[in-house]
Image (spheres, rainbow, N blue to C red):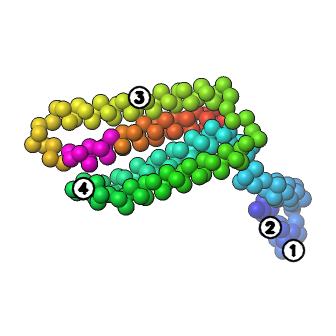
Amino acid sequence: IDATGCGGKENCMGDDTGRCMTHDLWSSLNAKMIEYLDSISLKKLVDEQLAPGEGRAWIGLLFTVLVAAYLLAKHAVIASAGDYRELGPIGTNVVLLLVVWALIAQVMRWRWKERVQEDERDRQIERHAADWGHGALVFCVIGLAAMLALSPQSRLAWATPIVTAHLLVFALLWGSIVEHAASAIAYWRDRRA
């Protein structure tokens, strides 16, 4: 990082005329920026800025989106499966993602054990986010029920028990995504205020 026009060569006005009148000001600014950047780290920024609830919300959002994206990417395999045993590798990968999520959440709890884990603001944000997640889940389940109930049977050949079960799992994931997103956004907005 260099705020000087000469790149520290002290030839701001040209090779013959030397440095400009504000060279010391810009050099001082360079030194202050480097001193500040040397004094901070990503860990320090996260520790000082991110509340434990916000960290949990962002990690939860990341992993629920990963699981949903993985299941969407495997939709053709799920739709063509004749038996649930054919879905073993998909289930194994989803379980591995959930285990990694649980491990990261535990590491964060250990890291933040000295800090206040929850206060009234956290409870309010979590209640509000849970309402959003619950609404999204209800919307998906009612939409799925209406689609299955109102569609002619000839158009429901795709709706095998395995596919229907995965649609219900996706509805649960959607509710979780909305809940974590609402929580993360509420923390982010609160931090910006």
| Foreground label between 4 and 1 | 4
Q: Which residue is mark 2?
A: 6
First along the sequence among labels 3 and 1: 1
- Callout 2 secondary element: loop
* Position of 180 relative to 17 (above/below): above
Residue type pointed to by label 4: Asp
The x and y percentages for residue 179 are 49, 35
Q: Pointer 1: residues within 10 angstroms few (<14), some, or many (20+)?
A: few
Which contiguous range is marked in magenta?
Answer: 159-168
First along the sequence among labels 4 and 3: 4
Q: Is residue 175 visible?
A: yes
Cα–Cα gap, marks 2 and 1: 13 Å
Left or right, 180 with respect to 40, comes to left
Say which residue appears at 58% left-offset and 33% top-offset.
Answer: 186
Rendering quarter of residue 7 = bottom right
Q: Which residue is mark 1?
A: 16
Rendering quarter of residue 150 = top left
Residue type pointed to by label 3: Gly
Q: Is residue 165 magenta?
A: yes
Whether the residues at callouts 4 and 3 have beta carbons within 8 Å, the answer is: no
Cα–Cα gap, marks 4 and 3: 32 Å
